[in-house]
Image (cartoon, rainbow, N blue to C red):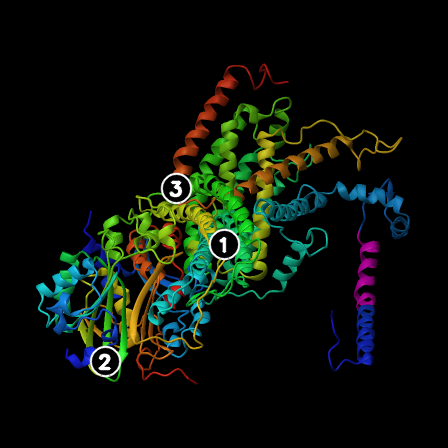
Amino acid sequence: MATAPKDFRFGNFVGSLIRLILWILVIVTLVGLPLIFIVLFYVPLPPVNGEVLTPYLFFSMMVDPTRTVPIINFLIHTDFFRVAVFPGFTYAALLAGATIFIERKFLAKMQLRIGPLYAGKIEGILQLIADGLKLISKEIIVPSGADKLIFWTAPVAFVVTSAAVVSLIPAAPGWVVADLDVGIIAVFAFLGFFPLIALLFSWASNSKYPFIGGLRALHQMIAFEIPFILSALSVVILAGSLNLTDIAEAQHPYWFVLFLPISAFVFYISSLAELERIPFDLPEAESEIVAGWLTETSGMIYGLIQLGTYIKLYALAALFVILFLGGWAGPQIFPEEIMPGYTGDKIYNATTVNAVFWFTIKTLGMIMLVLLPRGINPRIRIDILLHTGWYKLIVLAFINIFVALSLVYGGILGPGGLLST
Amino acid sequence: MENFEQKFDETIRRGLEIVKETEEDRLMTLSVGPQHPGSGHFRFTIKVDGDYIVYCDPDPGYVHRGEEKMCEYRNFIQNIPHLERPVIHDSTNITYSYSLAVEELTNIKVPLRGQYIRALASELNRQVYTLYWLGIYGIFLGHSTMFMWPLGDRELFIDLLEALTGARVTHAFNIPGGVRNDMPEGFKDRCLRQVAYFEKRLVEYEDIFYNNPLFRQRTEGVGILTKEDAIKLGVTGSVLRASGIPFDVRKAEPYDVYDEIDFKIQYMKTGDSYARSMVPLLDMKESCHIIRELLDKMPQSGEVRAKLQPNPKGPAGESYKRVESGRGALGYYIVSDGTPKPYRVKLSVGSFRNMLALPFLLVGSKLADMPSIYWSLNYWPVEADR
Amino acid sequence: MSSNQSNTQNGSEQKKNVTDSTQTSLSKKTEITIPEFEGSIVNQLVTKFTDKIVQVVYVRPGRTKILVPPNEIVQVATFIRDTLGFDHAESVSGTDYPKDNQIEVIYHLSSYSDEKLSSHVLALSTRVDRNDSRMPTLIDIFKSAEYHERETFEMLGVYFEGHPRNERFLLPEDWADIPPLRKEFRIKGR
């Protein structure tokens, strides 16, 4: 229970409140209101629902909630919404937050403990927010002799690169930020940035353990990049396209995981390594090299890298779903009409909602599968890891490439195949 | 194979100057500890050439408390609580040999039931210690479930010891002349229930942790200590038994009632990290058996401690007694000059003796093997520092 | 080693004390029978070296203590290792005796390779001058004494000649006081 300080005076308290209100009023009057007027009167606003959005129309819409529908409808179809909200950053960040919560609870259940409990009353659901606030409020310590520019930009670059990967992933038919013809190659191109960032950051930290960690990250990610790409290659052969939406839709009746189980396995293992998760968390192996390339991170720099890592986790899980688990395909469970007579085409669209639902479910399941090894495995050793990457996984990936090729040339799958629609 | 003498000189005696200056710029010096998550209250300086350790110099003493000096200022009974401090999670065993030595000096005979209860507390505490050790080993290998499960099961043994001794961690239960108090009612049944449960858990441990292929990859063939080297280095406890030498103080020199207990010495022959981590597990299994037998053979009633003088003292003399603790033979060398205070107390602890094997095994191994070798040596820094 | 020391030596009051004079007539004089096995070890030692070099302080079941002058300790230890079969040192410790102006350094030797000896601990002790406390190191004979001797050096100030690292081990690096286990070192407030 909070207690008042000894020199507490009610008058001072009231006075401070009044000062605060005064300042808010001053700022709103001098800055806020002119800003609103400038936007409403001088910036040309787009027509909404057939009418030009005038200030009068805007305020009347704000008063009547049912009339905000056109505004939302409009906003949803802007590029900004795609980038910032739905298939883009916010959706990924929310899923990343959910991942952290699930990871904690799931791991706790495996380890006969409870996990976060207090923050947010219900099963510690607000623990993440508490942790985030803690990280924000902590001091960021920059090691002496650090390369300041890289030290500050690398965490941001980490998050930005993760978000760039997310932007290529379609979450529902037509719902993708950047619908590239070379989608899958672009994904791997972006993933290639991560070892570079890790190495640069570890070098910029001017410390020994981060340096060893950075080198390990480099070794590990390069060793697993090749089986990673090769395992995706067999999917490309079957789908006949590099576009991720096309790949997802190419698996209409039969998911590729049925034909390419080995590739799926290689992809899964490689994404574990790419994500630096146990058993492949060598770059952060705390009992050997303190915290690896994250040793000198503190405060929100650590927070940003963690955010980036979990967004990347979502991206790779989603990529697995798109490549092997049929993307958003699933039985139609949402009704065409959410209320009688309303077949809202834009906001409530049964196909899209259904696709998003199945996509999210599959992605969450995939995320769980990525989290699972943490509870049952110790860390692998670096030489065994490299051996696994270079020798075993590449061979396995090649095996499934041959399977894919024989399926295509045997006329079973691919254009005009027996099983393709 | 290079011979032992040469390897010993190169690994343990090697001063900093031996690492040639021309090599200096290729090597990276890493200070593992005292703030390293994989060291404990302990530091060892290592030099790595690429991924290989070429130099290792242990530097203990961060938690040196001067226990031996403190003993000279207190009388025999007052010494018990502070002697527990080096290993608070194995506190019954560290006072066990102290009590044995003082009993020899002051000619105190322990009643039979007291001996049994003492051995029982010792076995329970060994389980507590080994479970803790196993949990930390899990953390060292990056296996967080292996950390949580043993610590959860350890709690049950701590509860048992709490019921028996009245304290959860530092029991001060062994005193010269027996134990402080008798078993509580219903303790036997509770103990048997717990042991039966724990034996089931041990099977799960073996299935889930020890048979995990990644665990085996990290420990098998890593840091091999051969039988001959182990003898020459004078290591003790599970490290010694993992190298194929069936030496256990409980068998070699049975103290109290251990000569009436039928048990086997668990040992393995490979001498690698896997054997060193497996032997404590086998010991725990055997310990369950010993606990059951102790409870079975224990006299149903009787004194648990001998009557003591207020300030016990014996004739001048000296005594060296050892018991098998969680970390191997734990000996006390006590010199008495006939006064109630000991003239000199020396603890010969397993951790300090096993520390010699650390540079011996680390030099030449990979940096990634450092945790699995270091913690498999059953080293407890606080005990080594005393 | 004068007989004066062995009287002040605590072992002399032990029930199975064997001083150098009684050693030759071991079976006749002692009231309590000496355990056979332990007695044979002692006999071997005394036969090999004369009783001037090896003084037997006590022989008890499982425990034997002998006292050797510091300049002879290397050859006695070599004999103990090679012929008697004690292969490692369990502990090396020292006891300060300001009254006699001496420090006793004691090696507790035991054996893993010989099963008969596994219950036995042979205490090999020597007494060095307190003001100039030097003795040859035994690390070439018992490798396991390496760190123990280092500890004894810093705790009691006994310089082990031939030990490569007579330096700080447990104590802080900036320790600037007398060795703490000497009796004139007092804990503050006690």
For image coordinates 13% across by 62% down, the residue present is C43
Q: Does the magenta stretch include residue A29?
A: yes
Q: How crowded is mark 2: few (under 14 residues within 10 Å), some or many (20 or more)?
A: some
Q: What residue type is labelled 1?
A: Gln
Q: How far apart are marks 3 and 1 (CA)?
A: 49 Å
Q: Mark 3 points at which residue?
A: B217
Q: What residue type is labelled 2?
A: Thr
Q: How crowded is mark 1: few (under 14 residues within 10 Å), some or many (20 or more)?
A: few
Q: Distance between the residues labelled 2 and 1?
A: 46 Å
Question: Closer to the camera: disc 2 or disc 1?
Answer: 1
Q: Mark 1 points at which residue?
A: B300
Marks 3, 1 in one chain? yes
Location of residue A245 with respect to B312 vertically, above or below = above
Main SS of the magenta part reads helix
Q: Which of B315 and B266 is in front in this view?
A: B315
Q: Distance between the residues labelled 3 and 2?
A: 59 Å
User: Is A111 left, or right, of C32 in this rendering?
Assistant: right
Q: Mark 3 lies on which chain?
A: B
**Which span is picked out in magenta?**
A27-43
